[in-house]
Amino acid sequence: MANLTINGKSISVDVEDDTPLLWAIRENVGLTGTKYGCGIALCGACTVHVDGVAMRSCGVTVSEAVGKQITTIEGLASNGALHKVQQAWVANDVPQCGYCQAGMIMAVAALLNEKPKPTDQDINEAITNICRCGTFQQVREAIHAAANA
Amino acid sequence: MNKHVMPKLTRRGFVIGTAAAGAGLAIGLDIPFGGPTVVRAADGSPEVNVWVVIRPDNTTVVRIARSEMGQGSLTGLAQLVAEELECDWSKVVTEYPTPGQSVARKRAWGDFSTGGSRGIRSSQDYVRKGGATARVMLVQAAANEWKVPASECTAANSVITHTPSGKTTTYGKVVEAAAKLEPPAEVKLKDPKDWKIIGKGVKRLDTVDKTTGAMIYGSDVKLPGMLNATIKDCPVFGGKLKSYDEAKIMGMKGVKKVVRVSDSSVAVVADTWWHAKTALDALPIVWDEGENAKVSSESIAKWLAEGLDNAQPAYIGNQNGDAKAAIAGAVKKVEAVYNYPYQNHAPMEPMNATALYTPDKCEVWCGTQNGEAAFAATMEASGLPAEKCEVHKLILGGGFGRRGMTDYVRQAVLIAKEMPGTPVKLLWSREEDMAQGKFHPVTQCKMTGAFDADNNLTALHVRLSGQSILYTVRPAALVNGMDTAAFQGLSPSGDAAIGYSVPNLLVEHSMRNPTFRPASGAA
Ligand code: FES
Ligand code: FES
């Protein structure tokens, strides 16, 4: 049993300590916006914020997440308004199949917190999520749009 | 707000018709109509025809038979219907009809398959007719109510206007009456120059849900009492499952059952997927890898290289002049061999399907590029007839051809069959997805060009050697055991015509179909 704080709510989950946070979020908490793509911290589909830092939740254990503020894609909007990254995604029609996009958006939201006006170079270095559909160009444009919003 | 309506995740699933379809309905494949018997959507709103449901509040529900996997065909197909329907685009929502209902209604929605960029191309004509037919019926219903000729009425934005009197009504108000009318035998489609929605850069209908985590993919399905499974098939194609030691994992947390799914695969069913995956990884499995265990990249390359030898049989896909003679007598010759490797489709969302089996009914929830093939796989694996099967389609986390195959659907049903009454979601690990790819064909190509003294190209011989997609997906289409369809971009004419004119040209394909790996469509 572990107590997690997800999207501002305290939730206790009955899992082994070494369960990846991804699966606790998806299966025990029931928030399915965070996706499984590889399970080995390579693709970024499972990206969430842990104390404001973008982390690949398949590579974080539940015990490591205890006591931290976890934000998932479902918790990114606030007071009913989409986050500026989500708004830029909608305005630029970024997603294709969309499966990678929750992780992509979470990674970008964390980047913009740290670097409000990232250069292309910053983006190349920070956003290493994989999109099998190939939306990388749209992602880049939408990051700049969000930064300038 | 525009929205794609997800199949309801209940045991009975998503039922469109109450006044059961089939008997008494004149449904043709090309322009399927509701006819005088009103067929109702799950919420009670009437179908004007199979493509169009209109709610009292003027929301237009457009039925989409093809699958959405990122290319926007869901939105594009809705645009086609909405254009002819003259409905309010801001109030368009979409939903997937199910293959089971389509079968029950004599294939009312036609082909469900989605691949090769055909989703819109091959259905645009009849979905536009569906929209146009519905418009004519709605206008007729308004005209009947006003007792005026329909020719005096116009429709735009879901509003019908009687031009001489200025009277107006809405689609939502006349839909009940419209649904009872006989559909017109002929409808005239709009001139493309008058299009307001088709071909315009409208926003995709499903973007918002894809940015908030609300979109439900196959792997997100949750059903009451559902268990989770993951599977390992023999890592060498054609190999067999020799044995496994289930006693080693039965005590592991959450594990419910170990299932021998086929003679080459074993699955673990557990309370959560993480428990299933952990247990399957710990399960001692002995494989009989068979003959193909000897296959290597080197042996494949060597075998394809043999097909580049002109003495081997090949199918000629395009020729003019006499390329071989021109090359033999050329002043200058250039030759190069190119290799194209196997490619896994690797959609971002690993293969998955959820199945609920009882002796009376088998239901499947999955992302698929071919709803009817998934339905057929459900029938075959469950052993139940069509009327006892159903497939509920969900949005795909990528397809690329891989989800045109139905191996994962069959597996999910076979597992669920071992646990009647319990829904089971089968989700492959990424490792399984990489191991069980139906790769895009491996190919080699020898290009030989001949030049005259001024370096003009006088002849080109393109000799392809490789695997055939057709051989796996439509073996009946082979001609004398050879693939006639491997020439996209090199054909003499049509969409896939070669872009150069060469005085002497020979393009041929030597089919080299390995027994070690089936192929599937474009990556
Ligand atoms: S699922 Fe976590 S990085 Fe791929
Ligand atoms: S949008 Fe499909 S994987 Fe990124």
Image (cartoon, coloured by chain):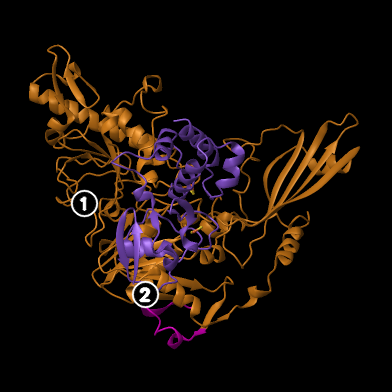
Chain colours: A purple, B orange
Residue B288, magenta (yes or no): no
| Residue A80 percent location from the top left of the image | 28, 41
Label 2 CB sits under 8 Å from any ligand 1 atom: no
**Picture coordinates of residue A9 (x, y %)?**
30, 56
Q: Residue furthest front?
A: A67
For mark 2, does the 10 Å Cα neighbourhood hold few (<14), some (14 to 19), or many (20 or more) residues?
A: many
Question: To which residue does mark 2 refer?
Answer: B270
Q: Is residue B460 visible?
A: yes
Mark 2 and 1 residues: CB-CB less than 8 Å, in contact? no
Q: Does B417 sit left or right of B344 as displayed?
A: left
Q: Label 2 to label 1, Cα distance in Å?
A: 40 Å
Viewer-closest of B478 and A75: A75
Queried whether the magenta region covers residue B248, the answer comes back as yes
User: Dot 1: what SS?
Assistant: loop
Is residue A38 shown left or right of residue B390? right
Asked whether, in this view, residue B384 is left or right of residue A18, the answer is left
Which amino acid does the dot numbered 1 rest on?
Answer: Gly
In the displayed structure, B53 sits above or below A47; it is: above
- Mark number displayed over residue B22: 1
Name the chain under label 2.
B
Q: Which residues are magenta?
A: B243-263
